[in-house]
């Protein structure tokens, strides 16, 4: 998948007006996810994405943040400049496309590293 394809899929899932809006939302969500993950996990995930998308997943340290789902959504709201009611669909749109893009093994590892409830954001509530 290319950078443009990824953004096109996010645009479609989130019903965004254009690719620029999809790019801004993608950066907010994946930047926040990068902070949530351990540095090594963020790097492994980035390796499975188009380079420009993977660059949004910048881990902060070896431990990552310990945010639950609600705090994650709050942090996406802060990063996107939206309220939490808007930030949740942003997270769902981007993370669903991410789940469709990475290998099944990488998705399983990623979801297993996160607390219960994150699987739903990735469009896979059955993995909770």
Image: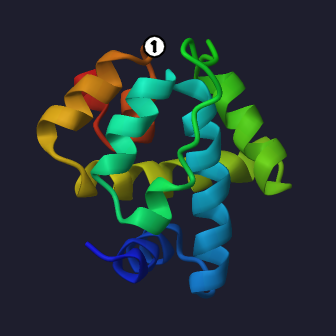
Left or right position of 15 against 128: right
Residue 19's x, y, as percent?
57, 84
Left or right position of 88 against 82: left
Q: Which residue is mark 1?
A: 115
Quarter that holds the C terminus:
top left
Front residue (pair 110, 87): 110
Vertical placement of 27 versus 102: above or below? below
- How many numbered discs? 1
The answer to which quarter of the image holds residue 73 is top right
Vertical placement of 113 versus 45: above or below? above
Left or right position of 12 against 111: right
Q: Residue at x 36, y 30 (%)?
A: 119
Residue 29's x, y, as percent?
60, 49
Vertical placement of 22 versus 62: above or below? below
Quarter that holds the N terminus:
bottom left
Front residue (pair 19, 41): 41
Q: Residue at x 43, y 18 (%)?
A: 114
Residue 15's x, y, as percent?
53, 76
């Amino acid at each position: 998948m290319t950078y443009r394809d990824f953004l096109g899929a996010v645009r479609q899932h989130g019903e965004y007006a254009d690719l620029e809006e999809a790019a801004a939302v993608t950066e907010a969500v994946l930047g926040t996810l990068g902070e949530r993950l351990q540095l090594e996990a963020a790097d492994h995930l980035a390796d499975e994405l188009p380079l420009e998308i993977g660059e949004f997943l910048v881990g902060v340290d070896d431990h990552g943040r310990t945010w639950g789902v609600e705090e994650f959504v709050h942090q996406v709201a802060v990063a996107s400049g939206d309220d939490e009611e808007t930030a949740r669909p942003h997270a769902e749109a981007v993370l669903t496309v991410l789940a469709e893009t990475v290998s099944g093994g990488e998705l399983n590892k990623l979801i297993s590293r996160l607390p219960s409830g994150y699987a739903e954001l990735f469009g896979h509530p059955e993995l909770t």
